[in-house]
Amino acid sequence: MLFIFLIGVKMDPTMVLKSGRKALAIGVLGFFVPYALAGIAALIINQCFSLDHDVTSILPLIVALQSMTSFPVIACFLTELKILNSEIGRLASSSSIICDVLHWSILSLRFVSKVATEKSVTSSIGSFLSSALLITVIVFGIRPAALWAIRHTPEGKPVKEIYIFFFLVALMGCGLMGEVIGLSALVASFILGLVIPDGPPLGAALVERLDCFVSVLLMPIFFTTCGLNTDVFAIQKLMNAGVILLVVFVSFVGKIIGTILPPLFCRMPFRDALSLALIMNSKGILELAMLTNWKKDKVMNEECFAIMIISVVVVTGVISPLVKALYDPSKRFIAYKRRTVQHSKRGEELCILACIHSQDNVKTIISLLNATNPTTDSPMNLFVLHLVKLMGRSSSLLVAHRPREKPSLYPTQSEQIFNSFRKFEERSRGAVMVHCFKGVSPYATMHNDVCSLALEKRTCIVIIPFHRQRINGERIEAPYVFRHLNKNVLEKAPCSVAILIDRGNWKKGRSAMAEPSSYQVAVLFFGGADDREAVALAGRMSEHPNVNLTLIRFSSLNEIVGGTDRSKMLDAETLGEFRLNTLHNEQVSYQEEVVTDIASVLAVTRPMENTCDLVMVGRSHGQSQFMSELTKYSEHRELGTVGEVLVTTYSKGSKASVLVVQQQTRIWGLLNPEESLHLRRVNL
């Protein structure tokens, strides 16, 4: 009952209305095709063979069970495979809700017909009115109470204990009343969970309080009990086992056919469509609970129960490795052309994706964006993605933000962030166009939101904060999940990536860079594609009237960075073009430094922590003896060798923020972006 209640809390019933035509088609066909095929198979078997009465009586139940695709099971399965917020993950979630609605609708009709045939008219009317009264109390009594509790809980503050206590008491009361009127405690608990809004603050608080108790303590006990109740030696007749497994197999194939046809019709790759069909066939705790109840109520005997339990375990055990082998969401995050700042033509719209974790990230990122000098001749198309941890929900979310018709006196954190960027857009006077998005997903797969949005919007660069966050003015090390997010974005992004290490010391003002004060930017150039990307970004900054920029070229008597002759030729061309474009710009300076070891590099970079507002450097550099010495200082590999040196050697009160840039690494058909500009086909 607690598990079903939590599933209801995590669900968003409006997803049924929001589901697109593709999800609707998959849900409908994914239910009715296996239902029809398995039903026909069961009917033919009944006509052709002389079966035991126990088997004959449960075949309709098996057909309904196998046709069902339970949303709770699908959500848990997707979370375990870390594809909850992937393309087929969202499609499977929406489709399973449609399938669930159809399944429970048919069960409700059966329940009504059973009551009407087995009981008197008075009893039937009484049962119907009792159920309607309970549902009315839940919808029009408890739901308003939940909305009232949410309104009286300030954002970011925990829900009061008395509210949690009230809804737990309401859960027990509704469960009791459900049993009394014959509706079942499970159904009453599920309806109660549905009327409580998912996500923070209330839904997340209830899930946080109960989830550990349910998933860590009660669910293992339930699974153990199912195993203890399963007597495999009760399977005596191979005929019975063969008939039941045949119906299960026909239903399995029917669900594959019903689920795979709509995606293929919409030109989804076959591997992805097959993965989706396999996911929709997965079974879990809800199916085990139904089988256990049927056995307890003497609807199913020991032999049939054991056969069905084995089939559930085998099917789910086979599906999981197959989906892992077939589907990799990162394979679709490959661009078909160069998406970098370096390869963006002047005068073209520069598309940037800025990722935000909290309000603390906003000021520095706006300052950085303004420094890139967006103008009406060279505008910026800015996509802002607020990344939020999935809490108290079963389905992930990636949606465009729609402003309220009337501004709220208590805006949410997302609204505060987006309002800051809207003001930045207004001050730009047409040079910046802002599009706001909110992504709610587990930290483990949050990079899918970043990469899919970057691919869809054809961005040239993704700006994402470093995993060290600033809270109340103090710099702390954030959980491993942020570092994992950054590493995945660097590996899988379809465009260039920049990691911003925020020192929190950009100049104050309504909008940094909006006032006529000067800003000091330094670019460190050692060589390689990433350094060239940093120089390309610096070239745009050099045109800003309030930016003073210094480009430092490091060289050594020995090879300072590894790389091919072509790479070194591209380095020389990039530097030559930069110097030519900034030749008459007095705010831009160029200097060369000959270094011999790490000490000489630090002697050049250390004064910058108090004289510069921003230091830019490429992430990766070719292997050389010089770079191998710097590697000893590296702890955070996602920053690269030089970036890590800058972060670790700058003092706590350092003024300079650091921007570590990586040029696009994933391009369709391009084996080595630095070696060749000719496309070559590769097997993915």
Image (tube, rainbow, N blue to C red):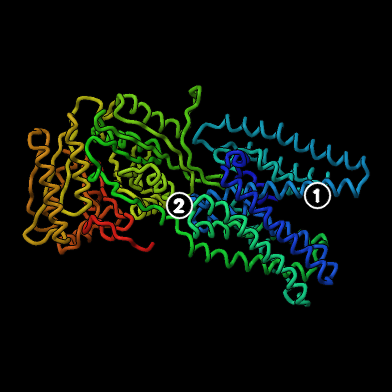
Q: Pick the residue in front: 156 or 241.
A: 241
Total marks shown come to 2
User: Which label is found at residue 53?
Assistant: none
Q: Which residue does the image show at 82% across and 59% down from the upper left?
A: 297
What's the CA distance linking mark 2 and mark 1? 40 Å
* Three-letter amino acid code of the residue under disc 2: Thr
* Three-letter amino acid code of the residue under disc 1: Arg
Left or right of 365 on screen, residue 205: right
| Structural crowding at the residue carrying mark 2, measured as other residues with C-alpha within 10 Å and reported as few (<14), some (14–19) or many (≥20) | many
Q: Position of residue 522 (x, y in %)?
A: 17, 42
Task: Reply above or below: 254 against 195.
Answer: below
If the image is split into quadrants, where does the C terminus sit? Answer: bottom left
Residue 674: image quadrant is: bottom left
Q: Position of residue 35 (x, y in %)?
A: 71, 56
Q: Position of residue 219 (x, y in %)?
A: 64, 58
Which residue bears the numbered disc 1?
A: 110
